[in-house]
Image (cartoon, helix red, strand yellow):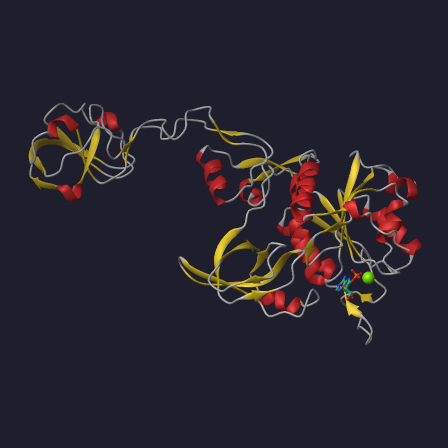
Amino acid sequence: MAAVPEPSLILSFEDARHLVEHHAAQLRPRGKELVELLEGAGQILAEPVVADRNFPPFPRAMRDGYAVQAADLSQIPASLEVIGEIRAGARSDDIPTLQSGQAAAIMTGAPAPAGADAVVMVEHTSRDAGRVQIMKPVAAGDNIVPIASEAKRGERLLSPGAWLDFAAIAVAVAVGRSRLLVYRKPKVAILSTGDEIVDIDVPPAANQIRNSNSYSLAAQVQAAGGEPVLLPIAPDEPARLRELIADGLESDLLLLAGGVSMGKYDLVESVLAEFQAEFFFTGAQIQPGKPVLFGRVPSGAGALAREQPASPQAHVYLFGLPGNPVSTMVTFELFARPVLEALAGMSPRKLAFLKARLKSEIRTKTGLKRFLPAILSGEFEHTEVEVAPWHGSGDIASMTRSNCYIVIPPDRDKIPAGESVPVLMR
Ligand code: AMP
Ligand code: MG
């Protein structure tokens, strides 16, 4: 039977989250591998990426127009002699150094000629054969990006731990990196528990529920940069649960779903204790997801039980997530994700909520911080959010109709329509 959790191990949401972040900050990824650039998209960079040249490599025109000396435009209109044309891709030294009284037609992206200190937009000029009339003055530096102003040769542009999103991919290409070192994805064992749970291709009897948690968690793990390892369903029976937990401890992180509430057959905590598990919290003041458990087991504890080689890490971290499907999903995002991201090599990031206008009043109970599945709608800067109709933490269908969570602080029991409320996007 599950031990009764010490009250001190039930933390506020913020304390629980900070504790997870604290442990995550000490974790290191497993190893590195070299991948083709696009294969690396969405993975975590494991090496610095430096500028192999100056950016831009030449003073670059930002507009179509005329390269000039700004000092020549003190009297407007000014008439300048056009000495040539520079297109993108041209060599600026094919154009003689610009002298006072001269201009060169220039296109966006072309190198500004020596002697020019500004570009006048073509809209403010009128061309007449070999001369151009300038109708608007410019300041020195206008419409020219100076050489090396974006980055100097040798400067670090991306650091290990960077998430390789499309902007990072552009940077890698700009410095000529067709392959990148990325961190290996951590293996995340997923173990669902419950006598009533059956796997996807077993026709469920009337008293049985299909195992959705293992699969929703696997999808969340993949999206967060991990490699899910699905274990067989554990019954509410200590011997088999023990075996499967031992298997799970072979991975870099163990996620258990179900069996962490206070019921007679909620065995996860007591079986984990047999592996010398250390618990950092056994509950958080949140809804859904209050019985969430966070701990770790010394490496080898699982393998010892099965006489197999130990993992090279000092500990295997684990989460016991409540089995109600919405609770499982929410607690993964709130607590398991930062640990997984750290094992994946990602630089730590704080959890930040956005704000949106509440469409209709919310009434709830005080005492817990609530993460209510919600629908963010509207358009452009006129966004609104409302709670998705749902029937509690088992209602997976309502999750598919929602796209975010409204976050309600524990001291509020009524939030009027129109208030700006915190929203956690998903
Ligand atoms: P538990 O946390 O084990 O008390 O489970 C709480 C509720 O979640 C019960 O109604 C379970 O039937 C349901 N549940 C537990 N595990 C799963 C699972 N793997 N897939 C779908 N529902 C589950
Ligand atoms: Mg259960």
Q: Residue at x 57, y 35 (%)?
A: 180
Left or right: 157 as drawn, with respect to 380: right
Q: Quarter-wise, where is residue 200 in the image?
A: bottom right
* Residue 90 horizontal/vertical position (percent): 27, 33
Image quadrant of ligand 1 equals: bottom right
Q: Is residue 319 above or below residue 55?
A: below
Question: From the viewer's perspective, is residue 183 above or below residue 248?
Answer: above
Above or below, 174 against 249 in this view is above
Where is residue 171? Give x, y as percent: 46, 37
Q: Quadrant of residue 31?
A: top right
Comparing 61 with 325, the one in front is: 325
Residue furthest to the bottom: 206
Name above or below for residue 44 compared with residue 202: above
Q: How many marks?
A: 0
- Residue occupying image coordinates x 68% and y 43%: 15
At 18% from the left and 33% from the top, the residue drawn is 138
The x and y percentages for residue 296 are 79, 41
Front-most of residues 419 and 319:
419
Answer left or right for 80 relative to 202: left
The percent position of residue 369, horizontal first and vertical second, equals 64, 54
User: Which corner quadrant holds the C terminus?
Assistant: bottom right
Query: The N terminus lies in which quarter of the figure?
Result: bottom right
State the residue in front, 355 or 79. Answer: 355
Determine which quarter of the picture holds residue 30.
top right
